[in-house]
Amino acid sequence: MRGAKNGSRLSIWRAAYVVARRDFTAILFSRAFIFFLLGPLFPVAVMALAGSVGAQVQSEASAADVGIAMEAQHVDAMLAAREEVGSLVGPSLPRMVELKRLAPGETFDAAAHLADEESGLAAIVTGTPQQPELTATQGRLARWQGMVALVAAHANSPGAQSYPAVGTTLVETSGASENTGRMRTAQGGQLLLFLLIMLLASMVLSNLVEEKGNKIIEILAAAIPMDAVFLGKLFAMLGISVVGIAVWGSTGFAILTAGGVSLSDYANPGVGWPMFFLLFAAYFGMGYLLLGSIFLAVGSLAATVREVQTLSMPATMFQILVFFFASLAVTDRGGWLEYTAMAFPLSSPFAMVARAAMDDAIWPHIVALAWQALCVAVFVKAGASLFRRRVMQSGPRGKKGRRSLTKLVGGMFRNSSSSAG
């Protein structure tokens, strides 16, 4: 924050800018970043494929057939009644197919036929329209008994059945559907924010461990303040994250637009879509800086990738618990649980994203962003302090060696900053 006292060191903010620009450029134009952008496409593709397969299985399961084994005239009457009743009831009415036309007096063992795995039927109706008998499992008996009775009654006396015309009044939405839609938007926003933060914050650790392994971090420690290194790396990764989100967001928007999906298909958030996206970006920045400062501090304690995985696991598990806490707070609007989630620094971004979806007030977000900015400053200061102590312990020993290394790398950073200016 002060200017350089001598020619060997830059100010904290100027040095942080140089570090951030160096890391940002090095990562952005690397081949690894291209694969990083492509990485989320694979789980998304797998999820979409699994969803389509699951929907197909669900469709096949729900489209189970009910076989009819009756005398010929009764089979025809039941099938005709099913078509007429089905036009009123809709897809909830099970499909009925002809199983067997029985001769007068012939019996049929429905239970034995249904037990045969090759039959492919969910239930069998026997008897007559006057006295139908449904053979099925317990769940389908409770679900289809009334529907089969309705079809049989219509087949028995079609002239006696009358279905009055029902008047309809169309409304765009209702209070219940609006609240339900906003609740889904709140939960979806929280989940997306959590996934983005956890996915992108991990880059900070891998980059730090790599530079600790090849001693670059020690050279930086000899040339510029370690607080500047901490800030530079943190904001460089935030910039890389913004680029990644812009690419993913543009691709997703193009795909949804090509598929005829628009924001009007979803419930409007309380603050409106433009303000919701703006607040989402602000809360992503705050959440990323909070978690990134923790990860950087944790990374300063590790020397290898194995140690990073061991030390970062508690932080990751704690963040998952924080996400569950913020998700639970959505169900307690105006209660102590919601206010606690909004006040706790790590859960505050998630709770406020949900608040933006559910409520139209803007002033709580101004207060929350100010509080989160203060927490970011505290977290960054504490993380930079730990970062400085841990890295300096493994730095070059001796005043002479440090002085010569400072002059060498300080000249490199002065040239870099002068060219940036």
Image: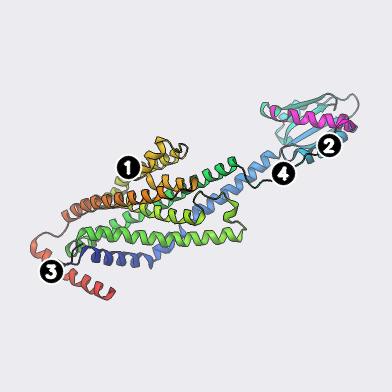
Disc 2 and disc 4 in contact, CB within 8 angstroms: no
Neighbour class for label 1 at 10 Å: few (<14), some, many (≥20)?
few
Q: CA distance from mark 3 to mark 4?
A: 79 Å
Q: Which residue is mark 2?
A: 79
Neighbour class for label 4 at 10 Å: few (<14), some, many (≥20)?
few
Disc 3 and disc 4 in contact, CB within 8 angstroms: no
Q: Of circles 4 and 1, which is in front? A: 4
Q: CA distance from mark 4 to mark 1?
A: 55 Å
Sequence-wise, the earlier of marks 3 and 4 is 3
Residue at figure coordinates x 69%, y 27% from the top left: 142
Tally of marks: 4
Q: Which residue is mark 4?
A: 169
Q: CA distance from mark 2 to mark 1?
A: 63 Å
Q: Of circles 3 and 2, which is in front? A: 3
Q: Of circles 3 and 4, which is in front? A: 4
Q: Which residue is mark 3?
A: 6
Residue 51 picture location, percent across and down: 58, 47
Disc 3 and disc 2 in contact, CB within 8 angstroms: no
Q: What residue type is disc 3 on?
A: Asn
Quarter where residue 35 is shown: bottom left
On whether residue 244 falls in the magenta region, the answer is no
Q: Residue furthest bottom?
A: 419
Tell me which segment is drawn in magenta. 142-163
Q: Of circles 2 and 4, which is in front? A: 4
Residue at figure coordinates x 51%, y 53% from the top left: 272
Q: What residue type is disc 1 on?
A: Pro
Residue 240 picture location, percent across and down: 38, 61
Q: Of circles 3 and 1, which is in front? A: 3
Q: Note whether residue 71 is visible.
A: no
Q: Does residue 328 lie above or below 297 as drawn?
A: above
Q: Main secondary structure of the magenta part?
A: helix
